[in-house]
Image (spheres, rainbow, N blue to C red):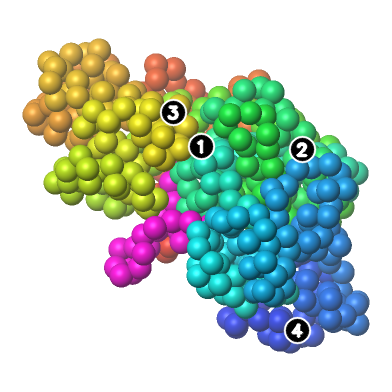
Amino acid sequence: MTDKDMADKIYIEPLTKKTIEKILEIEKPDSILPNLGGQTGLNIAMELYEDGFLESHKIRLLGTSPEGIKKAEDRQEFKDLMEQIGEPCVASKVVNTYEDAENFASEIGLPVIVRPAYTLGGTGGGIAYTMEELEEIAKSGLHLSRVHQVLIEKCIAGWKEIEYEVMRDSNGSCITICNMENIDPVGVHTGDSIVVAPSQTLADKEYQMLRSSAIKIISALKIEGGCNVQFALNPNSFEYAVIEVNPRVSRSSALASKATGYPIAKVTAKIAIGYTLDEIKNAVTGKTYACFEPVLDYVIVKIPKWPFNKFLTASRELGTQMKATGEVMAIAPSIEQALMKAIRSLEENVDSLELLKLKELSDEEILKDLKRVDNERIWVIAEALRRGISVDKIHEITTIDKFFINKIERLVRIETSLKNEELTKDLLTIAKKMGYTDKVISRLCGKSETEIKEMRLQNGIVANFKMVDTCAAEFDASTPYYYSSYDEDNEAMDREDKKKIVVLGSRTNKNWTRNRI
């Protein structure tokens, strides 16, 4: 957006309402699109609309209507709408003073979650376990909210958190682009949670129940473009609750877009200027249209990237306020391989589920660390499994679904085999399919990296490339992209008769580095 080949004019100014007013007076646009500029852009657009500035300058808001945005962002209006359409919300109350927050918390009992209205990444919110914590968090949330409003919500930490990325056009046509499941349960901001897509632990009844709810909600809000709906799901029943809706393209949208190959921002922009889903062609297939829901025949794993290496004294504990400044995403045929690829992408000098400093801790200290929710929790779980702590015990402490803990245990078992067994072709093949690099395998089995590579090549264990085409190969793809895997099938198109180029690109912010071949 700061490239003169992309933008007609670039302003390097504070992103405030007054600055935007001056720019709009200079540029005199016919319209502005508020739901592609993040939470700050959305907030400023709403301020300009509510103050009458847009109307006085004959500037239209494109995409989702201001009324729809307000119903999604204003905690009381959203709660009222959910009650009208029969969608369940957690016991909660919208308040504008600390006294009201204190009274309601006393009524429903602690702990409670504080969710401010119109803030980015849960800023000003948190979980209050005591009245002293409630006073600190609620007062901060009221101060930081644009409308001085917070939602006091009964804490349901431990429920599954599920997110649906959805798209709707002006005709009312709706699709779900993909759904995502947080490995961390409710209580950790989705931006700070390890996320898998598509969801892995939902039965079809649960999947369809939440999908229908997401479509019902965005239809009631009259969303035009992309948005996401977040749910809490009771792991022991079919009970669920709507957490919130982001009526804009968000970081989750970027993740879903890259995971599926569906260009959410591009489609949202086209819907804003009047196109409908059945008129927007899918650029990947060149044949289907944007009204076709993407199909995933692979798994993606997202791991947040935190700046704790730059802020050494900052608390590493995670909660409802997002601390991550970026994220990495990996694609693979299995969760295990995708998880290992994502860990290596973090650029934290960690290439596996072994964290050396944890080996110095006692079993009691490991059990204590399992109770703490921080950026190293996944490595603590792996270390606990190495110590013989059971999956059931870890689930009891963390409330993370046993499915995910079992996946980590499988990786730990591969580690054990590589350390204690003779390295055979079959074991090497399994290790590569689980995402272990030659370097890690050599370290675990006591051979040199060169020996591992030679053994691989001699046995034909080489990486192949699989396709991301939005349709699971149902249609031919003209512009797909690929991910590497040690599966036997190679889906890369044969272009031996044509010249080839390799483009290696990196952005200045390494949290969002993207390399494409």
Identity, as a three-letter code, of the amino acid under mark 3: Lys
**Image height check: is 11 above or below 392?**
below
Of tags 2 and 4, the one toward the viewer is 2
Circle 3 sits on which residue? Answer: 402
Of tags 4 and 1, the one toward the viewer is 1
Q: Is residue 133 left or right of residue 272?
A: left
Q: Distance between the residues labelled 3 and 2?
A: 26 Å
Whether the residues at callouts 1 and 2 have beta carbons within 8 Å, the answer is no
Circle 2 sits on which residue? Answer: 213
Please rate how many residues cluster around mark 2, counting C-alpha atoms within 10 Å: few if below 14, some from 14 to 19, many from 20: many
Q: How far apart are marks 1 and 3 (CA)?
A: 15 Å
Residue 189 or 464: which is nearer the viewer? 189
Of tags 1 and 3, the one toward the viewer is 3
Q: What stretch is highlighted in magenta?
A: 302-331
Please, what secondary structure does the residue beneath circle 4 have? helix
Circle 4 sits on which residue? Answer: 21
Please, what secondary structure does the residue beneath circle 2 have? helix
Q: In this view, does 427 lie to the left or right of 109?
A: left
Whether the residues at callouts 3 and 4 have beta carbons within 8 Å, the answer is no
Q: Is residue 305 left or right of residue 296?
A: left
The answer to whether residue 495 of the structure is visible from this angle is no
Please rate how many residues cluster around mark 4, counting C-alpha atoms within 10 Å: few if below 14, some from 14 to 19, many from 20: some
Whether residue 321 appears in magenta in the rendering, the answer is yes
Q: How far apart are marks 3 and 4 (CA)?
A: 52 Å
For the N terminus, the quadrant is bottom right
Q: Distance between the residues labelled 1 and 2?
A: 20 Å
Q: Distance between the residues labelled 2 and 4?
A: 38 Å
Of tags 1 and 2, the one toward the viewer is 2
